[in-house]
Amino acid sequence: MTEKNFSVFASGTFGDWAKAELKLPDGRSVLGKRFLKDIIGSTGCEISLNALPAGKSVPFFHAHKENEEVYIFLGGEGEMQVDGEIVPVREGSVVRIAPDGLRCMRNTGGEDLLSIVIQVREGSLRQRNREDGIIPEAPVSWVA
Ligand code: ZN
């Protein structure tokens, strides 16, 4: 049996994202956060799906040792604070933060603040798009 070249995870609706429960090593849990690396078997990046409830802030600042993060906001309204600077965010906002940036996020709206966060080692991307892509000669067919 050969291993497939892909993995699939159904994360559900954004409403389902809010119900996801992340268990912390100290026994506490965080609602509305789910990491995907172990679920989908990604090897180069960590991805989290996040639904921060209305009126809530992440309860701590954090930075990273070597990973940068890209926050992609899908809905809601909020603010990111990075090194003391406050940036408003909403659907469509994309924020990249270097590892050293001391960051936090809060929801300032009335709906869940929805985001996807991609975490990857800073400086690790060696090629992309045309340098990395391979387009075979065969035409597209949807017949399996
Ligand atoms: Zn982080």
Image (cartoon, rainbow, N blue to C red):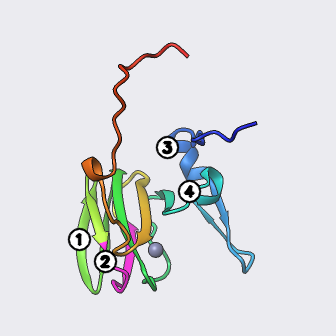
Q: Give, as a single range, the part of the protein colored magenta.
A: 97-106
| Residue indicated by mark 2 | 81
Relative placement, left or right, of 86 versus 113 is left
Identify the element where label 2 is drawn: strand
Instruction: Report the front residue among 2 and 117.
Output: 2
Name the residue: 50% across, 78% down.
59
Question: Tag on residue 97?
Answer: none
Label 3: few (<14), some (14–19) or many (≥20) C-alpha neighbours in 10 Å: some
Identify the element where label 1 is drawn: strand
Instruction: Report the front residue among 117 and 55.
Output: 117
* Image quarter (top left, top right, bottom left or bottom right) of the C terminus: top right
Q: Amino acid at mark 4?
A: Ser
- Measure the C-alpha gap from mark 3 to mark 2: 24 Å
Which of disc 1 and disc 4 is earlier in sequence?
4
Name the residue: 70% across, 38% down.
2
* Image quarter (top left, top right, bottom left or bottom right) of the N terminus: top right
- Measure the C-alpha gap from mark 1 to mark 3: 23 Å
Instruction: Report the front residue among 101 and 84.
Output: 101
| Residue indicated by mark 1 | 87
Is the residue 36 above or below the residue 80 in the image? above
| Residue indicated by mark 3 | 14
- Measure the C-alpha gap from mark 4 to mark 1: 30 Å
- Circles 1 and 3, Cβ within 8 Å, touching? The answer is no
